[in-house]
Each structure stands twice: as C-alpha cells, then as structure tokens.
Amino acid sequence: MKKLLIALLAFSLCYLSGCYDDAILRQNADGKELCAEIIQCIKENDISGIEALFCEEVSDTHDLDTEIELAFGFIEGEILSHDNFSIGSGDSTRDGKTVKSYVIPVIDNIKTDTGNSYKITFLSYLVLDDNDRMIGINYITIRNQNDETITIGEYLY
C-alpha cells in the first residue's frame, strides 16, 4: 500500500510540474516534423530522404530503395492536400529517465490530382535505451481509398 501511495504521489508531482506535458509536446513536435518530411519526400520522389528516416535495424534488413520506389508507385498522382497530422505517442521511464519514447503519427485524407485519397501511418522510436539501432522509423504503411496497403520496413520491436 505504501508503494502505491508513493507511486501515485510521484505521478501527481510529475503531472503537476508539467514534465508529463513537456514530453507529450516534444513527441507531438517530433511526430509532426517527421510527417512533414515524409510528405515532402513523397512530393519530390526523394527515395534517399525517406530512407534516411529509417532506423539502422530496418535499413540493414530491408531493401529500402525498392520498397520506397514501390510505395511511391502505389500513390497515383501528385499530392495536392492532406488533413492535419494526428500523433499518437507513448513513453516509459525508469528511475526518472526516459528509456522509451515513440510516436505513431497518422497523415489522413491525402488527396492527389488523380482524385485518389490515401492515409499514411508509421512508427518511429525517438528514444529506446534497450536498442539504439531501433531509433528512427520502423515502418510506413500507406492505405488507399480501397483499403489496399503497402508497407515500407516492418514493426520489429
């Protein structure tokens, strides 16, 4: 019972001091930046730009050039617009230190000049003390209006 009370008190202090909110704000900012980079790379057909966003582990185990090229071909037409980015996120701490932080952004309602629409989701680790080779994007999934999907990379952790 004493441990539960201490844990609740620690969480309350952290939440009231704003450190919890700061972590979420940082994750949202990082997630939005990654979304903007992905959209820009797709618009410019920048394979190396997308490839550079992936973590070492996925880069070493996948033919990202080919996967990205296929994904670019999956998107028919030029991107005209998209909805605001929504960012899911999470983190874990140990002894007051963040040991795991990740974002799972969604870029919804991507419209192209061919009248098609797409949705992009991805997972990116911002901090992962257990395996720093996983820091970066693990996968990007693109879904079209017919619920067909293509994925670059894979979920590894």
Image (spheres, rainbow, N blue to C red):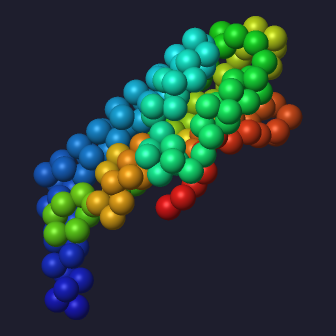
Horizontal and vertical percent position of residue 23: 27, 46
- 12 left or right, relative to 157: left
Q: Nearer the viewer, residue 46 or 6?
A: 46
Identify the residue shown where x is 61% and y is 16%. 45
Residue at the right extreme, as displayed: 146
The quarter of the displayed image where residue 132 is located: bottom left
Identify the residue shown where x is 62% and y is 31%. 65
Horizontal and vertical percent position of residue 135: 38, 48
Q: Vertically, is 49 above or below 155?
A: above
Residue at the bottom extreme, as displayed: 1
| Count of residue discs | 0
Residue 81 in view (yes/no)? no
- 25 left or right, relative to 137: left
Identify the residue shown where x is 18% and y is 48%. 18
Q: Nearer the viewer, residue 16 or 153?
A: 153
Horizontal and vertical percent position of residue 59: 51, 43
Residue 26 in view (yes/no)? yes
Q: Vertically, is 23 above or below 114?
A: below
The quarter of the displayed image where residue 47 is located: top right
Q: Nearer the viewer, residue 127 or 106?
A: 127
Horizontal and vertical percent position of residue 11: 22, 66
- 18 left or right, relative to 128: left
Q: Vertically, is 91 above or below 105?
A: below
Q: Vertically, is 29 above or below 82?
A: below
Q: Quadrant of the N terminus?
A: bottom left
